Image: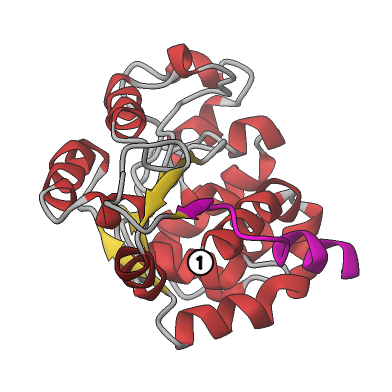
Amino acid sequence: MDSQQRQALAPSAIEVRLTSGDSDWEGTPIVLNVVDAIDLLNRPLDILVEDATSDGLFLTGTVPTPLRAKWEELVKDGSIRLQTLGGVTHVERRLAERQQQGRGALIRSFVLIDSDAPAPWGTPGELPEATARARESALRRRVPFHILTRRMAENYISPPAFNAWAQQQSKDKQGHVDAFARLSTGRQHHHHLKKGIRPGEEAYYAAVSNADQELLKHSLGDKAYRAISHESEANLRAYGAHKELTPLFQHLIRLA
């Protein structure tokens, strides 16, 4: 826990050099006069997510214990703000809008999006086209970003948490969650929990029984993210969520 805290609270990830002359926002590192530097320091870090409600609950529910107090402090005092993108296809437009506000708005932006990948990916070339375009939009404007390794935020929620949530849902959703728990861990990480097995993705379920495939075709709906409220620290750790997400939270805290 001490190690994770020290890494998160290391010097800021943003380097700025001061000048008595004109600011150079395009330099590496950026060179700013005192007035512009103070303005930049006073800007919150805007984390651009697909939906501030569901992704906000996801981040709140998955932040590791050693970093939780600092994360909650930054969110509470407004140093970190969640802003809704409206979907991965909107990244280009949203960043273009922020670009109009000046370089400072882009520097204090961070793009966090789902991979939407139906299978494990290791290179940008393996990402769906829309996700790859969003990545290029951020790179082109030098905006820091993170693409989730798993398909979407819901794929970090453990099967036990989904089971607790499903007990309050319909029979079809309970059946979907039961079949989901029987999938291999790798398939769980890339199964479309909101809509179920998607057309053209049947081959990924070749090792799954026909009965379970039928159950997995039922939609859990857009409110599936609420299962995070049934999550526990132990289950998140066992499901590998903390191992994957700790570096992300450390980076966000250092940017803030």
- Under mark 1, the amino acid is Ala
| Residue 112, horizontal then vertical, whole percent | 42, 48
Mark 1: few, some, or many residues within 10 Å (few <14, many ≥20)? many
Q: Is residue 200 left or right of residue 145?
A: left
User: Which residue position holds label 1?
Assistant: 256
Determine whether 193 is above or below 128 in the image. Answer: below
Report x, y in % for residue 28: 45, 36
| Secondary structure state at the residue bearing disc 1 | loop
- Report the residue that reaches farthest toward the front: 20
Residue at position x 62%, y 65% in the image: 62
Residue occupying the point 44% across, 27% down? 117
**Residue at 38% across / 65% down in the picture?**
37
**Residue at the spot 53% in from the left edge and 59% down from the top edge:** 255
For residue 48, above or below residue 212: below
Q: Quadrant of residue 121?
A: top right
Q: Is residue 219 above or below residue 212?
A: below
Q: Quadrant of residue 201?
A: top left
Q: Residue 198 location in percent, x, y? A: 34, 28
Question: Could you tell me if residue 24 is visible in this image?
Answer: yes
Q: Does residue 126 belong to the magenta stretch?
A: no
Colouring mode (rainbow / by chain / secondary structure / one colour): secondary structure
Residue 67 percent across, percent down from the top left: 71, 72
Along the line of sight, the residue nearer the viewer: 16 or 49: 16
Judge by depth and name the residue closer to the eye, 205 or 134.
Answer: 134
* Quadrant (top left, top right, bottom left, bottom right) of the N terminus: bottom right
Q: Is residue 166 visible?
A: no
Numbered label tally: 1
- The part of the chain drawn in magenta is 1-17
State whether residue 148 is above or below residue 64: above
Observer-nearest of 236 and 6: 6
Q: State the residue in front, 202 or 60.
A: 60
